[in-house]
Amino acid sequence: MSVKRKVLFVTLILLSTLLAADGPETGLPTDVSAFVDQSVDFAIASFSAASGEYGTMIVEPFSTNGTRTSLGELLAVSIATRLANVDAPDITVFDAAFYDSEATPPVPIEFVLTGSVFAVEDAVIVVLQFLDAETREVLRGMESGFGMSPWVESLLAVSIGAVASFGDRLEPDSIDNPYVLSTGETVEDRDLSPEGDEDWYLYEVVGLDGQGLFTVGTTGDTDTYIEVYGPDTPDAFLAENDDAEDANARVTVLVEPGQVLWVRVSGYDPSVTGAYSLYSTLEPFEGDPLEPNDSMEDAVKIEVNGDPIATMLMPGSDEDWFYFDLTRPPGPETVVSIETTGALDTHLEFYNESGALLLENDDGGEGSNGRIDVFLEESGRYYVKVRHYDASDQGDYELSVRLIQASPDQWEPDNTKAEAGDIEVDGDRQIRNFTPADELDWVTFTVQTTRTVEIRTTGDIDTYITLYDRLGNVVAEDDDSGGNYNARIERVLQRGVYYIEVRQVEGDSVFGGEYGLSVQTY
């Protein structure tokens, strides 16, 4: 049998251009060249096993997560070129770079040699596949690679004319193929794209003699979301965080030597794309000095108007109990304000010394912090329980208890329908506040003729309005139609007297929260 080798098109111009661009002066780097030779041997052996006779094969540019890169094109061209110049079975080799346009190979293609390129720390891993051209069934495979270098890294950029469908050079990564994160490592220039992309990391706890706090977080302008799974299995959910600082996420978990964790980074929702960097730290943990304070009996004392207590919530269902003493009633215009600060989504519960739950709050404070503002008429001991909103996170927070002088607005008292004050239709907007946070504001107005009436609130407070007729029947109600959590009702009203009840949304109330209220007609 005669040896018949033919390359109908090999992109020699591309090959020489890539080699000349900040690369080796002559030929490929030694380790890359060795990889090409190994790939050629693999292609010949695969062809012989599949056919043994004359046949056709096309070499497709290698891809990174389905996208062509300059490195992938260079590898394909190099392999195709060497296949055309070695003793081998009767193979007609085509370089797919030529057939990206409407042109097609002049004869049917029987086999395909393709590959996927992965950048892993200081190395490049390439997975070669020998396929049946008609069915795309993988007939044989091989994994090999070569070292990372500045030249190689530059060729990992998206090829000219290729459509970018991956975010960065560490793609593709997944729960089964995570990037291995080292202790204290910062991973720069990651990218969540296309929409729905997620990045996975694997971390093994090393360098600890005892327990430690492992923190992983993002920096940048992309609205990221972090989930941590483990230890030792990616099926066990451990912690999560959305907004730690600006749009970035941060999670801190308690770990022990030898444990393995999986970290998933995604956009806040699937439509979010963009660049970010990931950082990680590992610090020894000497224990929470306030523990055990997981029950009312073990509550830790906090001083009223004293320094905030700095502590932390541990993984899972940890809850922290505190108590404070009032030696005398605060007074009719003094509010007891209980508040957490920090990045955690805290939930507060407030009890009297008999164990009766008086109030609870989720997001009344800054960000996702809990805050309770309450008028207390009796002295005595009171208890506060702090927990994470859904036991899905852990980390540091501060708790404070302060006495604040209340400053009711000029329309008080107006907490009932009987106390409702007037608001002028088409008049000036009234500036009001909620003192205390859970109070109700009632106002009344009169419509002289049938008109379209708009009732709206303005400001940064999450308000809820209910409109009643003069007999107390509900005419309409609304929560967020006014934008930015403001309430708005637009309705055709007949002549008559009407009442408006304004309150803050339960769980999101803010002491002293100021808002505007107006009634307009059209």
Image (cartoon, rainbow, N blue to C red):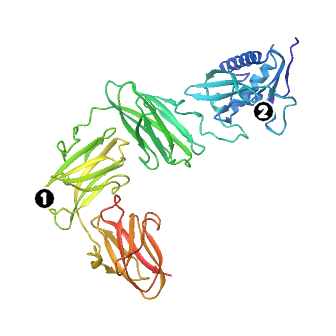
* Drawn side of residue 369 relative to residue 478, left or right: left
Tell me the crowding category of disc 2: few under 14, some 14 to 19, or many 20 or more residues within 10 angstroms, Cα based: some
Residue 302 seen in render: no
* Amino acid on which disc 1 is placed: Ser
- Marks 2/1: CA–CA distance: 83 Å
**Is 302 or 22 nearer to us in this picture?**
302
Res 198 seen here: yes
Left or right side of 203 for 362: left
- Residue depicted at 45% across the width and 73% down the height: 489
Q: Secondary structure at mark 2?
A: helix
Q: Position of residue 276 (x, y in %)?
A: 52, 42
**Residue 162 x/y as whole percent:** 71, 40
**Residue ID at (39%, 67%):** 464
Label count reads 2
Q: Residue furthest bottom?
A: 448
- The disc, 2 or 1, on the residue closer to the chain's N-terminal end is 2
Q: Is residue 487 above or below residue 159?
A: below
Picture quarter with the N terminus: top right
- Residue 165 is drawn in which quadrant? top right
Q: Nearer the viewer, mark 2 or mark 1?
A: 1
> Which residue lies at the image location 73% right of the left edge and 18% below the top edge?
46
Mark 2 residue type: Ala
Whether 34 is drawn above or below 435: the answer is above
Q: Residue under label 1, please give it.
A: 379
The residue beneath circle 2 is 97
Residue 200 position, x and y percent, is 51, 35
What SS does tag 1 mark? Answer: loop
Q: Are marks 2 and 1 in contact (CB under 8 Å)?
A: no
The quadrant in which residue 168 appears is top right
